[in-house]
Amino acid sequence: MGKDQTVTVGLNVAQHVLWHFGDTNLGLQPGGYIEQLFRLMDHADLFNRERLRLAYPEYAEAFFAVKNTHWGLEWLRKMVKAGIA
């Protein structure tokens, strides 16, 4: 996947990332594999971050938006609220 392509984040992915970052109201607890993936993303250097982005584009898009921007959590919350409504 090229860097110029847009990644669409699905409802479950958004809920899993919200859970990881402490929003247990709108979040949904993921399974052990995804929890481990988040631990990897949390500690990845730039090279490995890109490898994770290629392998898990939806999770990486949502996770790094929250981790690296001021608007990431609210973006996912709006997405989840719209998907639940």
Image (tube, rainbow, N blue to C red):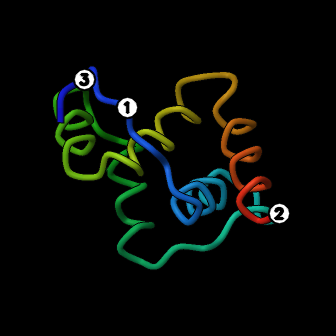
Please determine whether, in this image, residue 38 is positioned above or below residue 65: below
Foreground residue among 7 and 51: 7
Location of residue 25 by image quarter: bottom right
Report the side of 19 relative to 35 (left or right): right
Tag 3: residue type? Lys
Quadrant where the image shows the N terminus: top left
Kindly indicate whether the residue at mark 1 contacts the one at mark 3 (C-beta within 8 angstroms).
Answer: no
Q: CA distance from mark 3 to mark 2?
A: 32 Å
**Mark number for residue 53?**
none
Location of residue 24 by image quarter: bottom right
Q: Position of residue 37 (x, y in %)?
A: 35, 59
Helix, strand or loop for disc 2: loop
Residue placed under numbered mark 3 in the picture: 3
Report the side of 28 relative to 46 (left or right): right
Quadrant where the image shows the C terminus: bottom right
Tag 1: residue type? Thr
